[in-house]
Amino acid sequence: MRLRHVWLTLVLAGLLAACAAPQRIGGAGPAFERQGRFAVNLQPAGAAPTAAQGGFSWRDDGRVLRLDLVSPLGSVLARIRVEPGRSELERADGSRESAPTPDDLLALVWGHPMPVSGLRRWIRGEAAPGLVVDAQRDAQDRLTALRQDGWEVSLSAYDAQGPGRVRLSRLDSQGQWRLQLIVDRP
């Protein structure tokens, strides 16, 4: 009986983990792709903290970036599409928001300006164009830390495509913001 209970628990855990795994975003042609898990912690000034976690799937062909966010149980939370001159967020309920840039879109959705366009480079282990402060590199000359656009960026656990762990932290007059991406290994 005990062995059966352990076996059922393992099967249930496996099914839940499979449900939470984000689906690869399909598309034609070569693209930079990553799938994994995310965690966001927000502490707005004068408001209650909020947090979210789940899975992500990222596909960037150099022109169009698609980012799907799923809950821990696998349901779609949001889909983001970024292309030249347009960034769009589609929520699980079908509602949409759009703006000219990812930074403008986030300001529209959160009501607070916050530069996020650098993430497109940071997830590859690169600095975004613009001012970089305190860049640090490891023995293989891979970027491991930098400050850019108000973010403290930490990059680690590299594989052939880039960092397997991306940590962002920001403290400004509106509060404290943290984001972590952990890439699933194939």
Image (spheres, rainbow, N blue to C red):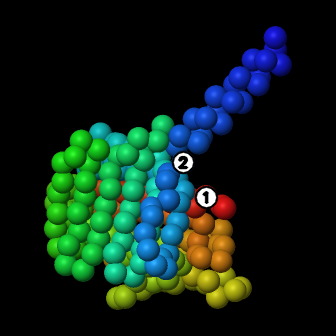
- In the image, which disc is placed on residue 184? 1
Asked if marks 2 and 1 touch (Cβ < 8 Å), the reply is yes
* Mark 1 crowdedness (10 Å alpha carbons): few <14, some 14-19, many ≥20: some
**Residue 26's quadrant in the figure?**
bottom left
Quadrant position of the N terminus in the picture: top right
Give x and y (percent) for residue 39: 47, 51
**Furthest residue toward front:** 28
In the picture shown, does residue 41 fall above or below 16?
Answer: below
Query: Total label count?
Result: 2
Q: Earlier in the sequence, mark 2 or mark 1?
A: 2
Give x and y (percent) for residue 163: 59, 72
Q: Nearer the viewer, residue 90 or 47?
A: 90
Residue occupying image coordinates x 16% and y 68%: 99
Q: Which residue is mark 2?
A: 21
Disc 1 marks which amino acid? Asp
Residue occupying image coordinates x 17% and y 63%: 98
Give x and y (percent) for residue 173: 25, 61
Quick check: can you spot residue 53?
Answer: no
Frontmost of labels 2 and 1 is 2
Residue occupying image coordinates x 24% and y 80%: 84
Disc 2 marks which amino acid? Ala
Q: Secondary structure at mark 2?
A: loop
In the picture shown, does residue 19 fall above or below 158?
Answer: above
Q: Secondary structure at mark 1?
A: loop
